[in-house]
């Protein structure tokens, strides 16, 4: 007798993903109470289950759980179909002594054996997917989408393929029909074929990120830099040079035509990430002009550098036969549209609020426990003239108040997701269920989203690729850390920031040197209670913090976290959604003054931020003298490349007739970012230096 090994290997987690948690719990309860159906196994591999209520469920060979048949009135999945799988597994265990050797292994021993979905051949794909689905997959593969693969490992036995718009999980190594996609179809879709081809192309059993090679080479869309592409790069360099010279504080009207022309040309080429980078730059300029609390001058400098660096890195990759990172990934070639999701579970990681002269806005950050992806729900509301403004936390989003949604777990069938991680959720109650965030809500999260400690997170951040070669996301480097102890905290009135130092690890006795994490929580005008909410949590001895989520960055080898939400033993606190009472904060700021090389880099970045806002043309003679002194100090620290770039920029300061200015400033910013991220010894080159794409003398 040939057993249904594909059903035997389905775990509780797999059944929950393929069905839903309610049906699985009901099936487990029935089996625990002895209410077992009668199992019949046919020679053709069909499994039937007859229940006491008179209904009969059946699952044919090579079919998925969603294709099971049942005589009950349910039109979709039901508890009978789910119970069939668990009952069959129990029936096999009971029949084990009577089975002959031809039955094969019946235990879950195969679950401990490494495997890859790339082992599914073309015959398996043809059997599981319709010809029209495979044709659609071939058309999608022609755009060479970038796919991130999470290989099998014992702690999470489902390999995952993260496609630009959706995620595919493989729960069976024998039946491709059990692959689960989070698109509206749920499985047996073109995304499953793309995921299998990507695992095939990767080979091996390690995590990988790759641009999918089409099955038909003639269908490949070229990423070579011809005259048209080089002209776009020159146009971007001219725009950035104009911004550097005249500053971001200038009137935007003369720049509108340049932005519109570039946007149209990037859209025609399908360079999605370049287009989004350009849009973010323009929105930052608007935020500055509108005095929005969203505006961040350091982010402005980073985006200006990213825009130039993406183009230079893509040009460099297009000229290589086998680039480390393909040009299509850097440019976002072929990434478009949005996808409707069939079933999505989201857990809140926090809220970010903002406001300007005319409108309010918010971003709710969610984690998907199944795929560990971070998504963002954005909304903005225009304030009417003379109207009493509605408190931002009372605004309605997806049928809920913003406060409720930011402190919630969401299960929905009405979500759409874009490639950059932005989602939209329908407000229909029958499609969306909202449950409160609890102290245990983050327990289902795993690495890389949830890290075991500060040292592990520092290592993860240190190994991450630079922003200018990664696919663009609405939010990056959001992580969850355990909290073993609050070492120190205090309010700095000068910077309007609450600083803290936490010991982030599971066990304080096993803490590593790098597990000490710095927190920085600036006052946010649109969420005036956030600082007080954090202070209350940090000072609560009876119910101290257990988990913290925030935006992570690396500085001098140490993790810095901008907190978003905190979980204690008893409660969940979303900082910007709280209503904490105003309190008097102790003026006990941490000693955060940098020294040596770090202090020098801070001063240089402060100067660059001023250049970007005011413009190089409008700098006084004293600024030129300061810059010359900073260049000399860089040279004295052994950073000859950075010092040389500073000298070149100074040479172009007034006239600025060379098109190389934007390249020089971009390279300088990236070099300094690399130096600040790591604990770099004087005279050493930062890790990011080897990835900077500006190497030809003609541009520098």
Image (cartoon, grey):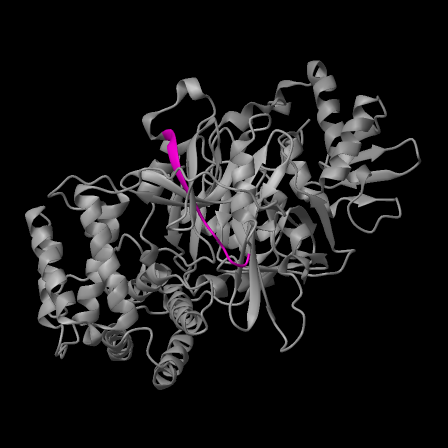
- Residue 255 appears at what percent x and percent y? 35, 82
Residue 29 image point, x, y percent: 80, 27
> Which residues are drawn in magenta?
515-526
Total number of numbered discs in the rendering:
0
Q: Quadrant of the C terminus?
A: bottom left
In this rendering, is residue 654 above or below 121? below
For the view shown, which residue lies furthest in the top direction? 97
Q: Say which quarter of the image contains residue 383.
A: bottom right
Q: Is residue 136 above or below residue 551?
A: below
Between 461 and 176, the residue placed more toward the observer is 461
Answer whether residue 444 is magenta in the image: no
Is the residue 176 above or below the residue 277 in the image?
above
Decide whether residue 521 is among the magenta residues: yes
Where is residue 137 shown, x and y percent of the image?
Answer: 52, 60
Can residue 204 be seen here? The reply is yes
> Can you see residue 692?
no
Q: What residue sits 32% from the left and 78% below the top?
A: 250
Quadrant including the N terminus: top right
Residue 395 appears left or right of 575: right
Residue 390 locus on image (x, y percent)? 67, 65
- Residue 233: quadrant of the picture: bottom left
Q: Nearer the viewer, residue 625 or 115?
A: 625
């Amino acid at each position: 007798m040939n057993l249904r090994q594909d059903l035997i290997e389905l775990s509780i987690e797999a059944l929950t993903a393929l069905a839903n948690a309610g049906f699985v719990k009901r099936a487990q309860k029935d089996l625990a109470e002895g209410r077992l159906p009668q199992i019949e196994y046919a020679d053709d591999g069909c499994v039937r289950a007859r229940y006491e209520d008179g209904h009969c469920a059946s699952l044919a060979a090579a079919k998925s759980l969603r294709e099971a048949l049942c005589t009950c009135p349910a039109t979709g999945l039901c508890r009978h179909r789910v119970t069939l799988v668990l009952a069959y597994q129990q029936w096999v265990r009971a029949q084990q002594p009577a089975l002959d050797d031809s039955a094969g292994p019946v235990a879950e021993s195969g679950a401990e054996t490494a495997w890859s979905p790339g082992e599914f051949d073309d015959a398996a794909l043809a059997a599981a997917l319709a010809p029209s689905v495979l044709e659609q997959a071939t058309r999608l593969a022609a755009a060479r989408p970038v796919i991130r693969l999470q290989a099998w490992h014992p702690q999470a036995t489902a390999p995952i393929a993260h496609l630009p718009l959706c995620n595919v999980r493989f729960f069976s190594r024998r039946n491709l029909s059990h692959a689960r996609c989070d698109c509206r179809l749920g499985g047996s879709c073109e995304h499953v074929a793309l995921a299998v081809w990507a695992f095939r192309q990767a080979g091996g059993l390690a995590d990988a990120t790759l641009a999918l090679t089409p099955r038909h080479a003639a269908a490949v869309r070229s990423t070579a830099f011809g005259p048209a592409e080089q002209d776009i790069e020159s146009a971007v360099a001219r725009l950035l040079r104009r911004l550097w010279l005249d500053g971001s504080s200038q009137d935007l009207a003369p720049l509108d035509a340049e932005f519109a022309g570039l946007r149209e040309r990037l859209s025609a080429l399908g360079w999605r990430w370049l287009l989004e980078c350009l849009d973010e730059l323009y929105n930052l300029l608007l935020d500055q002009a509108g005095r929005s609390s969203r505006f961040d001058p350091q982010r402005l400098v980073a985006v200006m550098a990213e825009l130039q660096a993406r183009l230079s890195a893509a040009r460099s990759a297009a000229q290589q036969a086998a680039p480390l990172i393909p040009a299509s990934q850097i440019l976002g070639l072929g990434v478009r549209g949005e996808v409707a999701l069939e079933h999505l579970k989201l857990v809140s990681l926090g809220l970010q609020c903002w406001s300007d002269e005319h409108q309010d806005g918010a971003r709710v950050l969610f984690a998907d426990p199944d795929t560990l992806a971070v998504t963002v729900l954005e909304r903005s509301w225009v304030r009417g003239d003379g109207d009493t403004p509605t408190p931002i936390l009372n605004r309605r989003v997806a049928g809920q108040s913003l406060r409720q949604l930011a402190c919630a777990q969401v299960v929905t069938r009405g979500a759409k997701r874009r490639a950059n991680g932005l989602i939209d959720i329908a407000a229909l109650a029958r499609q969306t269920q909202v449950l409160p965030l609890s102290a245990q809500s983050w327990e289902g999260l795993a690495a890389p989203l949830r890290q075991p400690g500060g040292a592990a997170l520092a290592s993860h951040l240190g190994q991450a690729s630079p922003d200018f070669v990664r696919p663009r996301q609405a939010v990056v480097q959001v992580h969850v850390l355990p909290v073993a102890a609050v070492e120190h905290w205090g309010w700095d009135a000068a910077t309007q920031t609450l600083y803290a130092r936490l010991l982030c690890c599971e066990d304080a006795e096993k803490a590593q040197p790098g597990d000490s994490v710095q927190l920085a929580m600036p006052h946010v005008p649109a969420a005036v209670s956030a600082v007080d909410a954090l202070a209350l949590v940090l000072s609560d001895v009876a119910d101290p913090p257990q988990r913290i989520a925030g935006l992570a960055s690396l500085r001098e080898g140490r993790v810095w976290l901008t907190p978003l939400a905190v979980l204690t033993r008893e409660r969940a606190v979303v900082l910007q959604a709280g209503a904490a009472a105003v309190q008097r904060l102790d003026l006990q700021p941490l000693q955060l003054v940098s020294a040596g090389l770090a202090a020098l880099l801070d001063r240089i970045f402060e100067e660059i931020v001023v250049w970007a806002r005011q413009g190089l043309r409008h700098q006084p003679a004293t600024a030129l003298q300061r810059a010359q002194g900073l260049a000399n100090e860089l040279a004295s620290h052994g950073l000859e490349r950075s010092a040389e770039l500073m000298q070149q920029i100074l040479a172009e300061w007034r006239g600025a007739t060379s098109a190389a200015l934007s390249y020089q400033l971009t390279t300088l910013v990236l070099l300094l970012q690399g130096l600040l991220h790591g604990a770099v010894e004087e005279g050493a080159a930062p890790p990011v230096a080897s990835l900077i794409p500006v190497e030809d003398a003609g541009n520098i």
